[in-house]
Every structure is written in C-alpha cells, then in structure tokens.
Image (cartoon, helix red, strand yellow):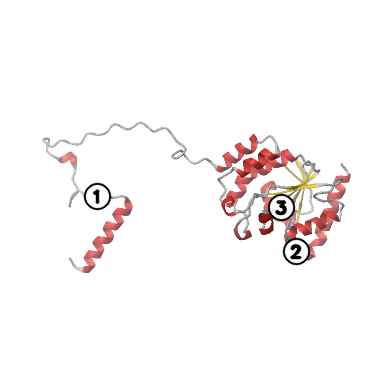
Amino acid sequence: MESSEFHHALALLEWQVELGATEAIGDAPVNCYELPETVAKPKAKAPAAAPLATPAVAAAADPVVEAERLAAAAPDLESLRAALAGFEHCALKRGARNLVFSDGIAGAPVMIVGEAPGRDEDREGKPFVGRAGQLLDRMLAAIDMGRAEAEAPVYITNVLPWRPPQNRDPQPEEIAMMRPFLQRHIVLAQPKLLVIMGNISAQTLLGKRGITRLRGTWTEACGLPALPMFHPAYLLRQPAAKREAWADLLSLKARLADG
C-alpha cells in the first residue's frame, strides 16, 4: 500500500474508533437476514430492567431548584449560611477562600445588597471591607448610619457569596443559583428598606440593568421599598458621580425619617 493510501486508511480507522467502533468483524458487511436457514441467527436479548437510580448515576439535580429547596428550608440566618456553605453546585466556591455572607446588624431597617466579593472581602469573609467598603462607611456616616451603629444600623450582603475569578462580572447561571438564597436572606433579615448597589444587584432583584438610569428612583423589590444606587467601586472610578450618590443618601435618610 502506498504511503498516501496507508495514511488515508489509518485516518478512516481512527474516525470510526472515535464514533465508537471497537472491533472489526470482516472485510464486508453481512446482512443476517440473508444468511441460509441452517445458520442460527443470534437471539434478541430481552430488554434489561432499568437499574435503580443511585447518587452516582442519577440525573444531575437542577442547581436552581436545589437552591430554592435549601433556601426555603432555612428557618433563620445561621441555617441559611450553613445551607450556602454546603451548596456544591456553584463553581465559584471551589476557587474562593471564604464564604462572604453578611456584615452589620441583622434586623436593621436598611439592608444593602452589593454585587460580589473582591479580594479583600474574600480574604476576610465580610462584604465591603476593601476601598469600596471604606467609602461606603464614609457615605453611611455622612447620614449618621453605619454597620455597627446602635441607633441607625445597616445590614449588608452581596448577590454572590463567593469571589468570581479576577473580579469578573457574575455569569447569568451564577446569579440564577444565588437568587433564591438572596431572596430568603432578605425575608429572614426583615429590613424595612433595601438599597440596591450596582448593576448586578439591580439585575438580580429588579430584572433590569442601567444603574445610571435606575439610581435615585424608589421602586420595589421582594415586596419592600428599594432604592438603586451607584456602587462605591463605581464612585471610586467616577468621582463626579458622588453628587448623585449624595442625593440618593439624603433620599434614603428622608425615607427612613418618614417611617
């Protein structure tokens, strides 16, 4: 056989192996229905009973359905934190150092929902502790609020509890998995108002993006009054937007004063 023919035949063989062929029976195909009657035809095997499903072979669970089940079953915040810690369907968990659940005082009238942990948050296991968090603390202090203030405390969490690689934006499937936990988090924390910081938070809780257009206008999320605002990380990149952020903070303070 010439070299080109050999390589052509070898390529055909490799292609058939990729398709699942495991053995060669003959040089030409055989139609068993045309064989002489004296040749016994192979008996057809009765279909085997379907094996019972086991965890190793059972169909993969829908991550969103599983998240909804676990979140709904959590009676309090500690149980919800434990449910998140045991949730294995989100790949972000395997690349993160810590679960970032919350900070501040649970039961505070204002609950702030950020986007996702960054490097500092991942290291310390708390939301908003990096440069953006320091700016947030200054913003809250300007209206006499804070995450540890007894008279006007806030409670803080994120859409995602684990840091995305290289601080990339969360993927739609990651948001979908974490939304049931976030919604249950809001129910259990029992705030009076929500502050939705950034596009990812707005997309998750409002189903909308475009924080420049949404900010400053009171709306509703999870049955609560909600105020979209610029994320502090955005304000660090765009200091000129701090004027709008100050207006939003004053709106938040006035809303709280009205009860």
Q: Which of disc 2 and disc 1 is earlier in sequence?
A: 1
Name the residue carrying label 1.
Answer: 23
Q: Quadrant of the C terminus?
A: top right
Name the residue carrying label 3.
Answer: 127
Q: Is residue 81 visible?
A: yes
Identity of the amino acid at label 2? Leu
Question: Circle 3 — which element?
Answer: loop
Mark-to-mark CA distance, 3 and 2: 17 Å
**Picture coordinates of residue 79 (x, y %)?**
66, 38
**Which circle marks residue 236 in the picture?**
2
Asked if the residues shown at circle 3 and circle 1 are in contact, with their CB atoms under 8 angstroms apart, the answer is no
Mark-to-mark CA distance, 3 and 1: 59 Å
Q: Which of disc 1 and disc 3 is earlier in sequence?
A: 1
Question: Circle 2 — which element?
Answer: helix
Asked if the residues shown at circle 1 and circle 2 are in contact, with their CB atoms under 8 angstroms apart, the answer is no
Identity of the amino acid at label 1? Glu
- Residue at horizontal 43 percent and vertical 39 percent from the top: 57
- Residue at horizontal 87 percent and vertical 52 percent from the top: 144
Q: Nearest the camera: 256 or 142?
A: 142
